[in-house]
Image (cartoon, rainbow, N blue to C red):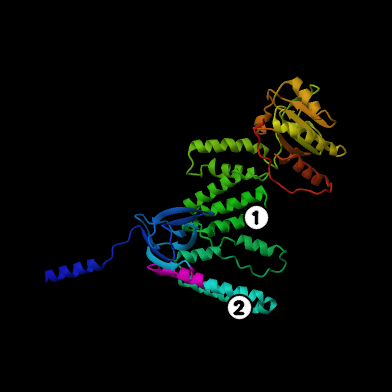
């Protein structure tokens, strides 16, 4: 009796499969002749290699002791780097077979239900896309059929998502969905549809699921919101980023990714005024202590840079300082009465200044009949050479307040973060910074626009790269 019981227990144990660890993805591609293949993954807008394996007669295996992080992965085929995608979720031990003639249409998968239905969906959509193109070519005659086709695809997708609610692919599809805008209520303004669409844009996005980071869809969703649904002004972008990051706080990895990604993007932006976005991100997330991954030395360095940029952000009132003009009289930006004040920092030994200064004075003379003044501040050198070069470059012209502070006693260099020359800023009557780090041509465009002078303009908003000053 005991012996029979023992064999029954042993038999049961034998048939209980141990939990599979790590990942084991076996691949066979007919017609693939390379000797190596790569397994890559998405992260934001980039792709990274996760694994490399040898290929023999089109057969290869990606294998590891630790499970892969969930997401969309790419099987990459050198030398031309053709690839196809697979879903990595809970099923990480499976096999697939296809051929180079048509990687998607000929895909056969064993051991992963999610990838099987993923490819069923891709094949279905490819067929419907071909039908759609044919109907579009018919113009008006195909319009009704095209609408019916779109409804068929929507119904199919809804049925798919209802049938497989726990699949990562279902969550990906939901993330890609656009809000359905209802009919505008009585009295609604013309922007009702836009505001509704924007306000509900993230309704189906699960920021708490870090697997979406390793797909292209979450990054694309966020990027579209910033690029197409947000006014391109630093204040508007700051509000949009705060909204996105507040949602991303549901997951530490997602939060870290978006904070770091957009900090780096705007730290290197060439668009005038966008340094204000960098300052905002540093103040809001690093100096506040929310960026848990950044050590104290890193935060201190970033804070120092943000504090240096902060006083002269576009839209803020320019810092005031006192320097001496060619007549020995004290002068300050706030003390100069003008509708528009060009503030120019230069060094007579700076190679770029030798070209920019005469061009600036020549451009400035065009505005002799307008309420525009120029305050030039020489930042290095001796007084005699400064006076000589000032005359040579035309800085002795009327309406030009020609100054120097070669000892930098006034502290203007710290206030305005003068690390190189030349540097041009434009201030309005209230000494608010309208533009900074701009070229002479850009200065003319902005002044012409502000003064209502009609001319062919260049709408470029890129800042002038910092020069070494020599």
Residue 73 in view here: no
Residue 277, image x, y percentages: 62, 45
Q: Earlier in the sequence, mark 1 or mark 2?
A: 2
- Closest to the observer, 213 or 315: 213
Between 162 and 64, the residue placed more toward the observer is 64
Can residue 422 be seen here? The reply is yes
Residue with the mark numbered 2: 148
User: Which image quadrant is residue 462 in?
Assistant: top right
Specify whether residue 347 is painted magenta.
Answer: no
Please indicate whether residue 165 sits to the left or right of residue 418 in the image.
left
Span shown in magenta = 101-123
- Tell me the residue at 28%/65% (across/down): 17
Where is mark 1, residue-wise? 230
Secondary structure under tag 1 reads loop
Task: Tell me, yes or no, whether the highlighted magenta stretch contains residue 102.
Answer: yes
- Can you tell which quarter of the image residue 20 is in? bottom left
């Amino acid at each position: 009796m005991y012996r029979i019981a023992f064999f029954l227990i042993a038999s049961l144990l034998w048939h209980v499969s141990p939990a599979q660890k790590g990942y084991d993805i076996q691949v066979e591609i007919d017609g693939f002749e390379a000797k190596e293949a790569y397994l890559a993954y998405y992260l934001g807008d980039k792709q990274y290699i996760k694994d490399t394996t040898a290929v023999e007669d089109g057969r290869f295996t990606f294998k590891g002791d630790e499970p892969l992080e969930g997401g969309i992965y790419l099987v990459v085929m050198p030398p031309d780097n053709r690839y196809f995608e697979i879903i990595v979720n809970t099923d990480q031990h499976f096999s697939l077979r296809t051929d180079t003639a048509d990687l998607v249409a000929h895909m056969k998968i064993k051991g992963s239900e999610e990838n099987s239905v993923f490819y069923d969906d891709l094949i279905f959509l490819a067929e419907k896309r071909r039908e759609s193109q044919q109907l579009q070519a018919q113009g008006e005659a195909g319009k009704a059929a095209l609408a019916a086709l779109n409804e068929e695809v929507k119904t199919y997708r809804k049925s798919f998502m209802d049938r497989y609610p726990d699949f990562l692919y279902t969550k990906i599809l939901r993330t890609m969905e656009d809000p359905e805008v209802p009919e505008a209520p009585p009295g609604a303004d013309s922007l009702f549809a836009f505001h509704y669409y924007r306000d509900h844009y993230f309704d189906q996005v699960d920021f708490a699921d870090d697997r979406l980071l390793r797909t292209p869809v979450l990054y694309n969703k966020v990027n579209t919101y910033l690029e197409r649904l947000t006014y391109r002004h630093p204040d508007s972008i700051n509000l949009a980023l705060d909204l996105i990051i507040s949602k991303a706080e549901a997951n530490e990895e997602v939060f870290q990714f978006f904070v770091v990604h957009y900090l780096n993007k705007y730290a290197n932006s060439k668009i005038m005024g966008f340094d204000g976005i960098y300052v905002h991100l540093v103040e809001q997330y690093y100096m506040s202590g929310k960026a848990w991954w950044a050590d104290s030395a890193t935060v201190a360095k970033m804070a120092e840079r943000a504090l240096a940029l902060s006083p002269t952000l576009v839209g803020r009132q320019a810092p005031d300082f006192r320097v001496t003009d060619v007549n020995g009289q004290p002068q300050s930006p706030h003390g100069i009465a003008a509708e528009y004040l060009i503030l120019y920092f230069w060094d007579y030994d700076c190679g770029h200044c030798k070209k920019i200064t005469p061009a600036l004075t020549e451009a400035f003379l065009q505005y002799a009949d307008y309420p525009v003044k120029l305050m030039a501040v020489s930042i290095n050198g001796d007084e005699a050479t400064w006076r000589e070069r000032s005359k040579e470059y035309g800085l002795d012209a009327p309406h030009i307040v020609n100054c120097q502070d070669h000892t930098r006693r006034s502290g203007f260099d710290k206030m305005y973060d003068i690390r190189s020359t030349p540097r041009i800023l434009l201030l309005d009557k209230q000494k608010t910074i309208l533009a900074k780090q701009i070229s002479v041509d850009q200065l003319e465009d902005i002044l012409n626009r502000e003064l209502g002078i009609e001319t062919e303009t260049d709408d470029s908003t890129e800042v002038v790269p910092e020069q070494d000053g020599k």
